[in-house]
Image (spheres, rainbow, N blue to C red):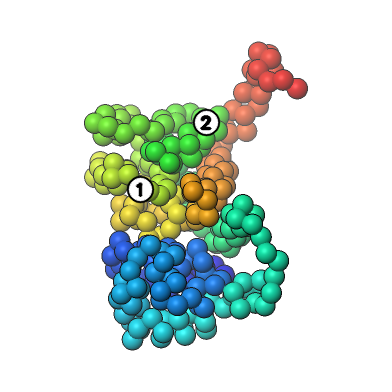
Amino acid sequence: MSDSPAGRLQGLFEGHRLTPTQRRIAHCMVRRATDVPFLSSVELAELAGVSQPSVTRFAVALGFDGYPALRRHLREVAPPGPGGAGGGGGEAFNEYQQAVLAEVENLKHLAGLLADPAPVERAGRLLARSRPLPVLGLRAASSQARGFAYFAAKVHPDVRLLDEGGSMLADRVDAAVRAGATALLCFALPRHPREVVEALEYARGAGLTVVTVAESAFAPVAAHSDLLIPAAVGTGLAFDTACAPMMLGRVLLEAMADELPDAQARLEEFDTRAAARGLFVE
């Protein structure tokens, strides 16, 4: 667990059975870890898009007498960093700059989580050993899955992209299992399609080990994942931004390639063929 404010907050929530509304509050608090100790229950409720009583019930569910007691605890375990709330002053940024800076913070949080490389290394082994390797991502997450599958196919012998829902999704999972798949990689981003949750439940029932990249350990897909590695999304613009999940996808590619003994040879073979075909403009 990272020793960053967000990491300590995430540790506070672990082990608690939270309702969907409470997971939403927890996710909001992790995203705003540096200033949440100074927010009122009303302000937190507005940021999370829930009611003020929901925030109070959330605090009680964590074992506190109420939100004031939770906030006092947060000021002890997750103090703001330089330039955070209560840090005194600071330059004013417009909404576009704020969105970019929020993504920088998401990447810093991811870097903190990767201080312990064991989960990523475990994921790399699982993905490398699965032949074929199904990669799932629907709607907002389809671009993440497609990007991973594009590069993974250059080092992995059989990558199968699952980026379309519908009644055939389960059929494609079955086909991968029959062909020898042992693991499935899922990119799951808000808003979470019901089909993704159902597909992961189906995949695990079919015997696949599910590795998931999601925005939070409290995402709805967590209950159907064997290994979930979180990477926060930005919410400062009208549409969410996913720089950290994309970066985590590239990290998983690296970990997987490290487990494939012929990965470098495959890359060199591709480069040779690409040069012969004049595929890229120098």
Residue at 43% x, 71% y is 44
Q: Secondary structure at mark 1?
A: loop
Given the image, on which type of amino acid does mark 1 rest?
His
Residue ranking furthest to the top: 277
Dot 1 crowding, Cα within 10 Å, few <14, some 14–19, many 20+:
some
Residue 119, position as x, y percentages in the image: 48, 56
Q: From the image, tell me which residue sits under label 2.
A: 150
Q: Amino acid at mark 2?
A: Tyr
- Residue 26 on image: x %, y %: 40, 67
In this view, the residue in front, 203 or 50, is 50
Residue 214 at what x, y percent from top left?
Answer: 43, 52
The answer to whether 61 is drawn above or below residue 92 in the figure is below
140 lies left or right of 102? left
Residue plotted at (44% across, 65% down): 47
**Disc 2, SS:** helix
Residue 83 drawn above or below residue 165: below
Q: Which residue is mark 1?
A: 192
Q: Can residue 113 be spotted in the picture?
A: yes
